[in-house]
Image (tube, rainbow, N blue to C red):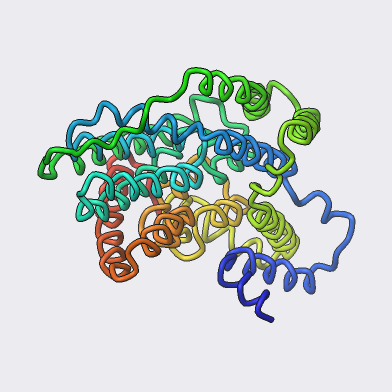
Amino acid sequence: MKLLKMIFKNETVFCISFLLAVLSAFAVHPDRMYLSYPDYRTIALLFCLMIIVGGFQSLGIFSMLGHFLLRGAGSIRGLSAILVMLCFFSSMVITNDVALITFVPFTLIVFRMSGRVESVLKLVVLETIAANLGSMATPIGNPQNLYLYSIADFTAGEFLQAVLPYAGLAFVMLMAAVLIQRDEPLLDVAGGEENEVQKGKVFRKMIPFLFLLLLCLLVVFRVLPYQPVLICVICVVLVVNRKLYLSVDYFLLLTFLCFFIFIGNMKRIPEISGFLVSVVDGKELLMGILTSQIISNVPAAILLSGFSSNLSALLTGVNVGGLGTLIASLASLISFKFFAKEYPDKKGVYMVRFTIWNGIFLAVLIAEALLLGNISG
């Protein structure tokens, strides 16, 4: 019973998706068509990318990068700008979750070392927004992008047209939010010089993961089929570091699978399918934003995609919809947990500031969507 309570507490979205899949199975009994529900390509790519990023993390690549860049920071403002940019741009490749897992603890440590603890709350909130919005700019930046890019057969131009106007404005807003703060001198936070021999060893160990990442990108852009790349990743990781299999978020993969089952079953019930199409079709961007506030943007993308004729607008909606509530993007919970552990007495203050800043960014991006004529209905 304790185990079930812990799973429900830590993996609420998975539990909900599992319940929906089970209940829908009573309406549409399991048959051979169930095998056609999942997008196996998306699930395979998610597995591969998670395990590759886990490999980079195990080598300390992101921490080394952070220390290297921080050597150029001479003030609180400069330090904040670098950390926000790290989250924004790194999330495009390593995903928003991993960017926050890597750089939020790093931020908490660095600010403790710098003696400017009072500035960290706003910075962690901005880093969270940066990771959520920076990740929208590439097909591999977050799970919903990977899924929608996979099923929609977007061209590169169509994908960028849907996300770049919003990611670009978000970056300008983030830099403005950082630069308007009062500047203060920074204590020395740079790490010690890395041993050149050690750097060489790390680079050699990194080569297999760079090769695997390249293969995955070729799958994303439909140059290679996913099956041989999946087998290659499994075999290489078995040889290089089999412990990396523990770094995979299997609950996320199972959540995708459960939602695929639920959506597949709903499509086979004409009354429900027709109703959902009438609600979603033509209002993808707005529905993507609103639904994300309740169930988060990854399941919102999977759910709404089954009843949408405009996946480009849905792509924009679920990415912008990562702003707002704390659960709009589950990656936001990562930052909250790290901050709450370090400052348990400031959880309420964090929630208030988080909601205010997210509300500002969300309002501006919705206004941009209205100006661009992307919101209708």
Q: Is residue 116 left or right of residue 227?
A: left
Does residue 80 lie above or below 251 as drawn?
A: above
Name the spot of residue 99 as percent of width and height, x first: 45, 42
In the displayed structure, 93 sits above or below 294; it is: above
Q: Position of residue 117 (x, y in %)?
A: 23, 53
Residue beneath the point at 80% across and 28% down: 228
What residue is drawn where x is 53% and y is 23%?
198
- Front residue of 100/92: it is 100
Question: Where is residue 263, by image quadrant?
Answer: bottom right
Instruction: Locate residue 235, reporting x and y percent.
Output: 80, 32
> Quadrant location of the N terminus?
bottom right
For residue 129, side relative to residue 272 (left or right): left
Residue 358, quarter of picture: bottom left
Question: Image height check: is 199 above or below 362?
Answer: above
Against 191, is 37 above or below? below
Q: Residue at x 63, y 37 (%)?
A: 49
Q: Nearer the viewer, residue 189 or 252?
A: 189
Q: 276 or 216, which lies in front? A: 216
Where, by quadrant of the figure, is residue 340 drawn? Answer: bottom left
State the residue lying farthest toward the right: 32
Q: Residue pushed farthest bottom?
A: 1
* Residue 195 placement, left or right of 211: left
Relative depth, front residue between 198 and 272:
198
Quadrant including the C terminus: bottom left
Find residue 314 and report its horizontal and vertical position in percent.
50, 46
| Numbered circles on residues, count | 0
- Which residue is at 32% across, 68% downward? 347
